Image (cartoon, rainbow, N blue to C red):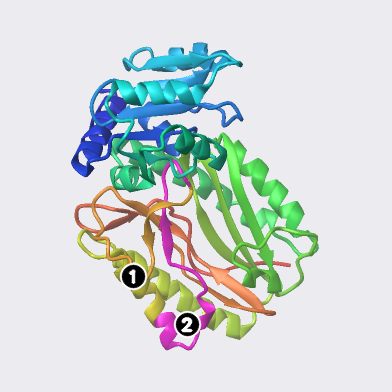
Amino acid sequence: MPDPRHERIERTQAALAAAGTGALLLGPSSDLRWLLGYDPPPLERLTMLVVPAAGDVHLVVPVLEAPLAEEHLSDLGIKVLAWHETEDPVALVGASLAAAGAAGGELAVGDQLWASFLLRLQAALPAAAWRPGGTVTGPLRRRKDAAELDALTRAGAAIDTVIEQLGDLVAVGRSELEVAADLDRAIRAAGHERTNFTIVGSGPNGASPHHIAGPRRIQPGDAVVVDIGGRLDGYCSDTSRTVVVGEPDPAFVAMYELLKAAQEAGCQAVRPGVTAASVDAACREPITAAGYGERFLHRTGHGIGLDEHEDPYIVAGNEQPLEPGMAFSVEPGIYLAGRWGARIEDIVVCTEDGGRRLNSTGRDLVVIAP
């Protein structure tokens, strides 16, 4: 299989040239990982990838990181420029830009670059204009290639095995913190190299979409929102399910059935050419019609890949048409402050003729015996 890194660098340089942007400057970030397959540590010492619109690509690194960088990049033809502790790495970046004829024009700088590094670059390159690097890399990254979709599929299957354990982990008397700790262990046991997050919101805490697990103990009749994700082979997983411990309140059951229907409508709306906003609307309209519009507090979804949240965002006002290879969450929620919350989330890939869910665990309300 051809190395996708060569093609990604070529596409990036072509995008820079088409936009009239002289170069892309990236620190340690998912953009750099996407281009190079290399994940340098984000240190106070500057590491910077210099991708000019035309010419040689350079990676500026601290000398102590140079052997590892050269090992990763030896087959890419990228020259590693190492700097010693008493040298100025920004001068190396400037020299690389000057060699490519890009020091005085527009430069795109990585969205995740530390402000301290950007300020030094701006001081050293006063003639340059600046734009966010995500305006270059976002359109390139949001359509996943076959290898990326395979990685996301594996991550989705792995996180599903953790969701299948909720009946054993969520129980009356257990604290949110205890459940979250068990979920963390299960996520890593399922093959993820790390856990990205474990949201466990029980009872009234479920009404806070990003609730941080705390000491509250699960009570009989509680609805419990569980939202978990990790990173497997570099790519992220993310799914949410809501369970009830003991006899559910009939009002909650009715609300949950509405939510399930809305989530299904959003998933069914996915197909090439429809806008991200229209998928949001497919979820939001039935919830609003039932009187819960103000209780759906967030966008319907976010793209996913090397980052947990990336393009495309499934939100009102985003008229970006969906394209095959785009992967994103569909996760409507309803939150009643002081009472309960519920959310159902699947990762969906836009295909040539519709949408394919990467999560396969059941969406019916699960009632766990107390």
Element type at marker 2?
Answer: helix
Query: In percent of the image, x 61 and y 62: which residue is there?
Result: 210
User: Mark 1: which amino acid?
Assistant: Gly
**Residue sitting nearer the eye, 292 or 157:** 292
Q: Residue at x 48, y 26 (%)?
A: 90
On screen, residue 181 versus residue 225, left or right, reads right
Work out whether residue 255 can be spotted: yes
- The vertical placement of 15 against 269, above or below, is above
Q: Residue furthest front?
A: 126
Q: Which residues are magenta?
A: 286-307
Q: Quadrant of the N terminus?
A: top left
Amino acid residing under circle 2: Gly
Q: How many marks?
A: 2
In the picture, measured across the screen, residue 249 lies left or right of residue 151, that is right
Q: Residue 293: give its label.
A: 2
Whether residue 305 is in magenta: the answer is yes
* The quarter of the displayed image where residue 5 is located: top left
Residue 161 in picture, x, y percent from top left: 54, 47
Question: Which residue is found at the position 47% from the left and 75% from the top?
Answer: 259
- The quadrant the C terminus occupies is bottom right
Q: Quadrant of residue 217?
A: bottom right
Q: Residue at x 32, y 34 (%)?
A: 104
Q: Nearer the viewer, residue 304 or 229?
A: 304
> Badge 1 is on which residue?
317
Q: Position of residue 271 (x, y in %)?
A: 24, 61
Image check: 284 left or right of 192? left
Task: Note whether 285 is above or below 203 in the view shown.
Answer: below
Is there any visible trace of residue 234 in the rendered image?
Answer: no
**Horizontal arrangement in the rendering, residue 200 relative to residue 326 (left or right):** right
For marks 1 and 2, give the one nearer the viewer.
Answer: 1
